[in-house]
Amino acid sequence: MGSDTTALVKGLVLGVGALIVLALVVFVVVSTLDDADLLSQSRVSAKVVNETVVSVTELGTVLSVYDYDGCSATIVHVLNSTSATTIPSNNYSTSGCAIYYIGGENDFGYNNTGWNVTYTHTPPTTYERATTGMGTNFTSGIGNISSKIPTILLIGAVVILFGVIIFLIRQSQSMGLGGSGGGSL
């Protein structure tokens, strides 16, 4: 085979190998930084006062801060939105950033009613959200790249095959085969 084909094969193998190694190194660095949880140290607690939550039932209703991963709210005070009476803590529970009606003694018809909820939560910082987004995007990007590697290798194989065919044609012509000179075997 010619040196062009050898260089092409070598470049293809080295390029795909370098891409894989680079992706692994970046993935390890990003996941290590994300797992170290260094950015959560700068979180600041926030308080939400009298958020109106409609139709609280046994199935639960999410609070407005529910949109981030790892959301956790601590209920400070709950009022019935129509009667403005305090709803005792034995009538509700929380899980993450959702509040659930659980009944209890002195129910007073709190199920499936509107509540005004005061709670605290500690939202992630902008940097934490960016890091999480970067990790998610990087993972999906790796998936996109890895799905293209077979196509890249196929194109490389076709180019190599054409190179081998051209090499064989040139060799046969130099031996006098396949030409118009009427040579014999």
Image: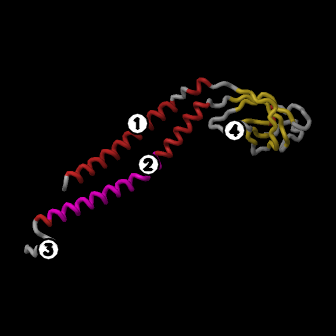
Find out whether residue 145 is within the magenta segment: yes
| Residue at the spot of label 4 | 66
Q: Please identify, in this view, whether the residue under mark 2 or under mark 1 is nearer the observer.
A: 2
Does residue 47 lie above or below 3 as drawn? Answer: above
Instruction: Please say which color scheme the image uses.
Output: secondary structure
Q: Main secondary structure of the magenta part?
A: helix
The reply to whether dot 2 and dot 1 touch (C-beta < 8 Å) is no
Numbered badge on residue 13: none
Residue 25: mark: 1
Stretch in magenta? 142-171
At which x and y percent is residue 1? 19, 56
Mark 2, other Cα within 10 Å: few <14 / some 14–19 / many ≥20: few
Secondary element at tag 2:
helix
Which numbered marker is on residue 180? 3
User: What residue type is disc 1 on?
Assistant: Val
Residue sitting at x 29%, y 47%: 11
